[in-house]
Image (spheres, grey):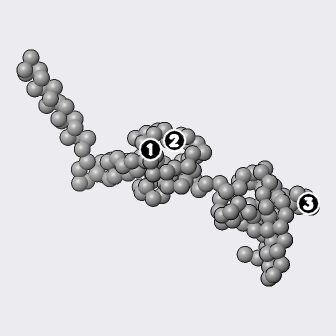
């Protein structure tokens, strides 16, 4: 019985030693919980995990937690697994089909109206918007406050 216990303890120690991070390991951020599409990532959702330096991923993965904070998830992320770069995106400020304010400003002139985005967009992205009053399609740049600015930028 004592020999059996010693073998079990030795095996457990070997497993723990094998999992411990070495100086050659890469530390990558991984989800600490399941993160679903549309969720915005915050610090409580990620943790660090060591990977062997020679470990090869199928796709490029996020290497810094700073890249993740505030990003929107495009597909389900499983706890403990490296996060592929193509599974995160900037948060959408305007959503396709949801009316939003369209602003034209030049000199001292300011004109506002309502438009329907024909595509979803992130801050700084140029998107097409249908002017509700005229029915014309215009191109504008998404602002941080959710408005779409057209004209001279």
Q: Which residue is mark 1?
A: 31
Report x, y in % for residue 140: 76, 66
- Residues under labels 1 and 2: Cα distance? 7 Å
Q: Which residue is mark 2?
A: 35
Classify 145 as above or below 59. below
Q: Which residue is mark 3?
A: 133
- Residues under labels 1 and 3: Cα distance? 46 Å
Q: Which residue is at a point 54% across and 55% down the rendered structure image? A: 70
Q: Quadrant of the C terminus?
A: bottom right
Of pointers 3 and 2, the one earlier in the residue sequence: 2
In the picture, residue 8 is in which quadrant?
A: top left
In the displayed orientation, state which residue is furthest to the right.
134
Q: Secondary structure at mark 2?
A: loop
Report x, y in % for residue 91: 61, 54
Classify 117 as above or below 111. above
In the picture, residue 107 is in which quadrant?
A: bottom right
Q: Residues within 10 Å of mark 2 (few under 14, many from 20)?
A: many
Kindly indicate whether the residue at mark 2 contacts the one at mark 3 (C-beta within 8 angstroms): no
Q: Which residue is at a point 80% across and 71% down the rendered structure image? A: 104
In terms of depth relative to the viewer, which is nearer, 60 or 17?
Answer: 17
Report x, y in % for residue 64: 42, 57
Residue 28 is left or right of residue 117, and the answer is left
Kindly indicate whether the residue at mark 2 contacts the one at mark 1 (C-beta within 8 angstroms): yes
Residue 39 is left or right of residue 96, and the answer is left
Q: Secondary structure at mark 3?
A: loop
Question: Quick check: can you spot residue 134?
Answer: yes
Report x, y in % for residue 34: 48, 38
């Amino acid at each position: 019985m004592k020999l059996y216990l010693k073998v079990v303890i030795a095996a457990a120690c070997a497993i723990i030693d094998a999992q411990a991070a070495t100086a050659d390991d890469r530390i990558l951020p991984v989800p600490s919980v399941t993160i679903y599409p549309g969720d915005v990532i915050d610090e409580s959702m990620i943790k660090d995990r060591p990977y062997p330096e020679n470990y090869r991923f199928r796709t490029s993965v996020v290497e810094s937690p700073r890249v993740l904070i505030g990003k929107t998830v495009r597909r389900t992320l499983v706890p403990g697994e490296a996060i592929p770069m193509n599974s995160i995106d900037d948060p959408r400020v305007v959503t396709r089909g949801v009316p939003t304010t369209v602003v034209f400003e030049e000199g001292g002139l300011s004109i506002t109206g309502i438009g329907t985005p024909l595509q979803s967009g992130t801050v700084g992205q140029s998107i097409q918007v249908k002017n509700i009053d005229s029915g014309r399609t215009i191109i504008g740049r998404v602002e941080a406050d959710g408005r779409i600015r057209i004209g001279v930028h």
